[in-house]
Each structure stands twice: as C-alpha cells, then as structure tokens.
Amino acid sequence: MKKLVMGLLSAALVGAGAPHAQAQKAPAKTQTTAKPVIHSKGAAKQAPPAGGQPRDFALPAKEDFTLDNGLRARLVPFGQVPKVTLLVAIQAGNVHEAANEASVADLLGKLLQEGTASTSATQLAERVARMGGALNISVGADQTTLLASCLSEYAPELATLLADVVLHPALPASEVARLKTDLKRQMALARAQPGVQARMKFNTAIYGDHPYGRGLPTDAQIDALTLEQVQNFYKTQYGAQRTSVYAAGRFDAPALRQAITAAWASFQQGPAPKIEVAKPLTKGDLLTQDRPNAPQSTIVVGLPVVDPSHPDYIRMRVMNSLLGGSFGSRITRNIREDKGYTYSPYSSLTTHYRAGTWSETADVTTAETGNSLKEIMNEVERLQKEAPSTEELKGIQNFEGGMFVLRNSTPAGIIGQLNALDLHGLPETYLTEQVKNINAVTPQQVSDIARKYIRPEAMTIVVVGDKKVVEPQLKKFQAERKKPL
C-alpha cells in the first residue's frame, strides 16, 4: 500500500510515473564531417554528430542459488563503487489480504521496522547507519520489499541483519496504536488528493471486487486491525518459498553467499507463491466525482491491456510512449503545448501479475474538461488510422531504449529488473534483448497495437471536478462521439 499511496500522491502532485525527459529527435543522416549551421545572426554553430547505434543491455554475470527451504538468491557483481545494494522481496502484499483486513500488510511492514527479538528499532537504525547505508521497508500490491545499502565490507553483516528483521520480528504490541495513527494520517493525506480519488475510482471500475480494485482503507478499517491479525498474516503469507534475496554492487561473493545461506536457512518454508489473477472489466463507463469550485478537473481515461508476459507488451510500451507516455508524445503536444489545457499530462502502463491497464491522466482547466477528452480520443483515433512516420518513431525508440539502459545503470536498477523478471516469470532475454526488440517495432505495428487495444469506446473515463461546470461538457462530449461510451 505504501508503494501505491506514494505513487498515487506523486501522480496527483507532480505527475509521477510519466517519463518527463524530452524524447530525442531522430538522428540526422550520417555525414563524414559535421557541417556548420548558420543562424540568422550570422554566427556559425557546429552541428552535433550523428547518434551511435543502440546497444542491447548486457546483464552482468551473476550467481544464482536456492536454499533447501526454497528461498532464492541472486548475486550480481557490478560497478567499481565500494557499496552494495540488497533487496529482499517477499510475495506477500495487499493482494493477499482478506476483505476484512485491508492494509494489514502495511501495518506488518511498519512493525518490521520496530526491531527484532534481539535488536530494538533504535539499534536497528543505528546498525544500518554504521554500515554506511539505509533500510527502507515498503508494502505494495503484490510484494513486501526490504531495500538496503551499505559499504562493501559490511555486505555479509547487512544480509544477516535483514534476515533477522524478517525471521525474528519483535512485532511490539506497544507500538501498534502509534503505527495505526500514522497509517490513518497517510491515508487521509492520500484521500484528499483529486489524483488519488480519480485513480481509486478507476481501479475499482476496472478490477471490481479483486484486491487491486479495493479503495484506500478507512479509519474504521484501520482501527479494527489487531495484532493477532498481523501475526496471522505473517504466519500464513510469509515464507522462504515466497522470498528472494538480491545483491548487486561490490562484494566478497563467497562471504556473502555464506552469510545468506546461514542467516536464512531456518526460515519457515511457508506457502507456495500465489497471486489471484485479476479479471479486469471493460465497461466503457463515464464516472464523475464532485469537487465544488475546483479550478481544475482531474481525468483518468483507460482500459485493461496486456501485461509484460504477453508478446505484444514491448510494442505496447513503444506505442504508449509515442501516444502519451513521453514529454514529446502526441497527447502532450496536443493538450499541453498546442491547446494549453493542462501542464503535465501523461499516459502509463500499470502492470500486475498477469494483468495490466493503459491510462491517460491529466489535470485540466475545468472549462476545457470536455475538450481535453475530445482531443485525447482524437489522438488515439489518429494513431489507429495512420501509422507514425519513421522519423517520429525513431525518436521514441531512442528515448525508450536509452531510458531502459539508463535505469539499469545502477545496482538498485539491476535488482529491480531481476525482481520484475521473477515476479512475472520472464526469461532473462526480456532484458538482454529489450533494446533490440524496441527498435524492431515498425510504424505499422504501432498503429496496429493502438487499434487492437486502445479502443475509445471501451475506455473507462473518470472525472473529478466541479460537477456543475463539468457535467454539461461531458454530455456534449458523449453526444459527439461516433461510438457509444
């Protein structure tokens, strides 16, 4: 839930998840020498050289091993900086909560930071700090993760400490009330944001009764949680079979392997990995939520699409970046640069295990709510009818390929990618051949993917804004649509 809330808050406040870096322009034709560019004032400026050929991401050599209890570990020597990043990923998140225990995974995550049977919360923080690092525990929809870093010489000690946090949590009853109060404040802050309101309404419409469609917990639901429920969630959802330990950076491999093996060997085997696959709904509903006198309307427009395990997913990513997922995208140019309806629109692909959605999000001027929706749909239909030019697509491919390699240029980035592979059950070639696959997408395939998946008549539309001003615009928008929504 922490990952979800922080992501939603970022989306509401600064448009998180949108790759706001400017997409690169298509490279100029190759020249043997760079020719000067003459500007109007007569000054000559040297033209930049042509860009190089894109290269595939090279996954560093790594060591994989599995303990007798089922825990998996992946060690990736990387870089020259004498630091190590460790990630413990446990497949136990909000998706595993029962309907009557919403956010129990979050409360457990907070309690894990309150120390172990032999180490207090203060001592835990001090030990990690003395290693030159930090520890963050985060609860998401599908996983709970412990991310930590330290100087290289402390890698075995940090691995042992992380095991102690997970295997021997103190779960102090004395801290439950305080942590529940913190959780309620966090949820109250999230609920106050129109971006979160719109996203929650969208998720509920798409995922229905599945945990992915569950709204943020109320104060009453959080108050009703008990320490016994937290303890039971730990016993029934945590275990070695659902846990992976990743390390990347500079480290003594034999020493770290030995430390992980010794520290995690006693972890209960626990349940086998399991995530209830969602069956997203395609309804084409238009939903509103009143926000009286709001100067802006927050809109979310989208529908279910494929997840990373599907052969169309890479083409979907390229299409998304061109349509609305990059700063140089078509929707952004239309409703931000040309029309001035919004400041930071973006489209995104949100994925879970075997489920995913495409959505366009924007905070638009209230008086232009209907026009904004119209222009978004116009751009979708334009892409469906006419393939982009080779030059436009090449700029998007340069952007996507470059950002992919850049995101994986750090130990944390590599670990994140390996964890994603494991969660979605993907082969390593998904990473090592991704740049090649991105650049293999053709203009016609981009248009075909838009036509196949991004269907305006099937989209769920959510608008959070001043209802008295917005409703007449929405009625006009619906009336002008060629296909019923």
Image (cartoon, grey):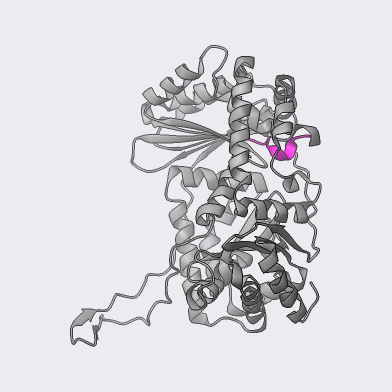
Query: How many discs appear?
Result: 0
Q: Quadrant of residue 484?
A: bottom right
Q: Is 239 inside the magenta-drawn segment?
A: no
Is 50 above or below relative to 199?
below
Q: Which quadrant of the figure contains the N terminus?
A: top right
Residue 200 in picture, x, y percent from top left: 69, 51
Q: Is residue 86 left or right of residue 107?
A: left
In this rendering, does residue 89 appear at all? Answer: no
Q: Is residue 132 left or right of residue 272?
A: left
Report the span colored magenta: 89-98
Residue at 75% x, 73% y is 475
Residue 414 in picture, x, y percent from top left: 49, 46
Residue at 50% x, 55% y is 14
Q: Is 93 inside the magenta-drawn segment?
A: yes
Q: Which quadrant of the figure contains the C terminus?
A: bottom right
In this rendering, does residue 406 appear at all? Answer: yes
Viewer-side residue, 430 vs 100: 100
Residue at 75% x, 61% y is 287
Residue 99 in picture, x, y percent from top left: 80, 36
Residue at 54% x, 73% y is 335
Residue 400 in picture, x, y percent from top left: 50, 64
Viewer-side residue, 293 vs 197: 293
Is 13 above or below relative to 43?
above
The extreme left residue here reads: 43
Is 408 above or below relative to 331?
above
Q: Quadrant of residue 386?
A: bottom right
Viewer-side residue, 76 vs 304: 304
Is 228 above or below relative to 436?
above
